[in-house]
Image (tube, rainbow, N blue to C red):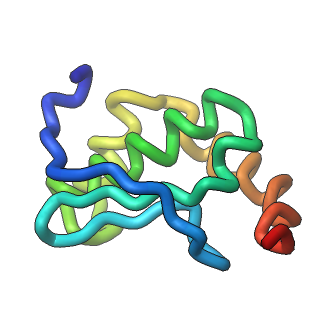
Amino acid sequence: EKTGVDYQKLRLSSARKRWGSCSAKGSLNINWRLLLTDDNLIDYVLLHELAHIKHLNHSKKFWQFVEKFEPEYKKKRKRLKDYEYLFLID
C-alpha cells in the first residue's frame, strides 16, 4: 500500500538462486527460503519486486524508487548475502 504499486499475484517459489522475481504481467514470486531470514529483509525483497512492476530493469529510476521507501536498501542487499546458505536447503 505504501508504494501505490498493484500486483496481480503473489506466489512462493523454490528458485535456487533468486530471492524473488517479477513478471511483466505483475506477478510476484518470492522464495520460500526468504521466510527464514529477518522480517526487514522480506520487506526489502517485496519492495524490490514491486519496484520492478514500475521499472522492469535496475535503472537509476528503479533504485530511486526503492530508496524512496527503503533508504538503507544497500545494507539490506548486503545482509541477504549472509543467508545464501539457505539455497542449499531442499
> Dividing the image into 4 quarters, which one contains the N terminus?
top left
At 40% across and 60% down in the image, what residue appears? 29
Quarter of the view holding residue 31: bottom right
In the rendered structure, the answer to whether residue 89 lies left or right of residue 64 reads right
Q: Residue furthest top?
A: 2
Using the image, determine if residue 70 lies above or below residue 34.
above
Quarter of the view holding residue 87: bottom right
Of 23 and 9, the residue lying toward us: 9
Residue 68, how many percent across, how many down?
A: 33, 31
Q: Residue furthest front?
A: 90
Residue 90, how many percent across, how many down?
A: 79, 72
Residue 8, how many percent across, how many down?
A: 15, 51
At 31% across and 44% down in the image, what residue appears? 64
Of 89 and 75, the residue lying toward us: 89
In the rendered structure, the answer to whether residue 71 lies left or right of residue 57 reads right
At 51% across and 39% down in the image, what residue appears? 44
In the rendered structure, the answer to whether residue 11 lies left or right of residue 71 reads left
Using the image, determine if residue 10 lies above or below residue 25.
above
Please count the marks in the image: 0
Of 88 and 45, the residue lying toward us: 88
Of 54 and 62, the residue lying toward us: 54
Quarter of the view holding residue 36: top right
